[in-house]
């Protein structure tokens, strides 16, 4: 039986007189990957921001996480409740290594009892966990490399690693493969598919490459000719 984790009900984002997100209602379920493939400028990122960041206030409608109405909460409070987005994590620590960045985010998992400033020696299991995530995301790459030295594509991969390290209940990816090469793209999309299967998480993915997501997505939201997006059920 599908269990709804996240829901938007008539969610509306207005900028002055301009209605950008127009009463959008969707439910997102545990263990399902929903892909969103509206065209460019079709307010996908704005819809994500209304759900996840709280920086743009909803003009109307609600965002619910399980039974809780989180529409008026700020980004930090939403994050603590289990919403996580790869696009939020562009504030990497450039002066720290790749491994240190992932380790820090694992330390910051809510309610796990690790202090953010606990020393590496006192929790070697965090380093082991960080290494194993990186071995999936960036195989054959140096884990001691400084983040400031990474290419854009590698920074996007690190964002995915950080999100896996944080392990939220809802993973939101806004075009995670945007600056990746043709070779790298399937690697990241496979990883995202594994999150859904292995961790029983809810995954929302904005992705242009329809041919790639067809095999991953349980449901696809598309924008047809009208402004209102439509939910399509995918048959494998
Ligand atoms: N701060 C803002 N002020 C006015 N309009 C905005 C604002 N933020 C988003 N929009 C609206 O959202 C559109 C771009 O949406 P966006 O979410 O970036 O699209 P997508 O991610 O689908 O490419 C703009 O054309 C505009 O209509
Ligand atoms: Mg966008």
Image (cartoon, rainbow, N blue to C red):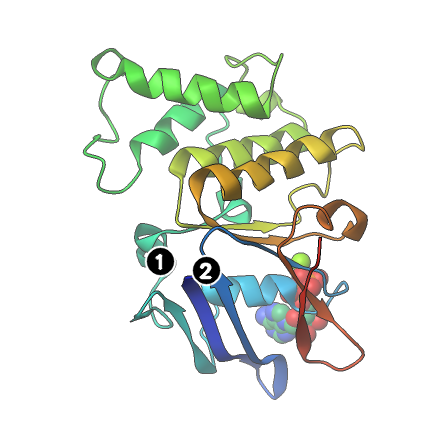
Residue 46 or residue 63, whichever sits in front = 63
Residue at the location (24% across, 26% down)? 117
Horizontal relation, residue 181 to residue 191: left or right: right
Residue 177 or residue 67, whichever sits in front = 67
Specify the farthest residue to the bottom.
17
Residue 68 falls in image quadrant: bottom left
Q: Kindly tell me whether mark 1's CB lies below 8 Å from ligand 1.
A: no
Q: Distance between the residues labelled 1 and 2?
A: 7 Å
Asked whether the residues under the numbered discs 1 and 2 touch, taking CB atoms below 8 Å apart as contact, a structural biologist would say: yes
| Image x and y of residue 54, in percent | 42, 65
* 233 relative to 179, above or below: below
* 139 relative to 57, above or below: above
Q: What element carries label 1?
A: helix
Residue at the location (35% across, 58% down)? 78
Residue linked to disc 1: 78
Split into quadrants, the picture shows ligand 2 in the one at bottom right
Residue linked to disc 2: 52
Specify the farthest residue to the front.
1
Q: How crowded is mark 1: few (under 14 residues within 10 Å), some or many (20 or more)?
A: some
| Image x and y of residue 194, in percent | 55, 36
Residue at the location (22% across, 41% down)? 111
For the N terminus, the quadrant is: bottom left
| Image x and y of residue 229, in percent | 67, 75
Residue at the location (68% across, 74% down)? 230
* 197 relative to 94, above or below: below
Q: Residues within 10 Å of mark 2 (few under 14, many from 20)?
A: many
Camera sees residue 165 = yes
Camera sees residue 97 = no
| Image x and y of residue 225, in percent | 81, 79
Residue 155 or residue 125, whichever sits in front = 125
């Amino acid at each position: 039986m599908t269990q709804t984790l996240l829901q938007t009900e008539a969610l509306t984002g207005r900028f002055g007189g301009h209605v950008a997100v127009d009463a959008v209602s969707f439910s997102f379920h545990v263990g399902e990957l929903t892909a969103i493939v509206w065209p460019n400028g079709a307010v996908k990122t704005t819809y994500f921001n209304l759900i996840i960041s709280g920086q743009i206030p909803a003009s109307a409608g609600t965002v619910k996480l399980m039974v809780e109405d989180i529409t008026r909460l700020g980004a930090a409070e939403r994050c603590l409740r289990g919403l996580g987005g790869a696009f939020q994590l562009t504030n990497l620590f450039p002066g720290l290594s790749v491994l240190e960045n992932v380790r820090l985010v694992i330390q910051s998992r809510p309610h796990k009892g690790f202090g953010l400033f606990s020393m590496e020696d006192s929790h070697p299991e965090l380093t082991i966990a960080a290494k194993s995530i990186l071995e999936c995301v960036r195989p054959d790459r140096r884990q001691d490399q400084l983040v400031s030295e990474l290419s854009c594509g590698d920074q996007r991969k690190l964002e995915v690693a950080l999100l896996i390290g944080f392990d939220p209940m809802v993973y939101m990816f806004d075009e995670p493969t945007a600056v990746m090469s043709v070779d790298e793209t399937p690697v990241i999309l496979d990883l995202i598919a594994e999150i859904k299967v292995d961790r029983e998480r809810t995954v929302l993915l904005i992705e242009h490459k329809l041919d790639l997501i067809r095999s991953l997505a349980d449901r696809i939201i598309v924008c047809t000719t009208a402004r209102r997006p439509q939910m399509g059920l995918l048959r494998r």
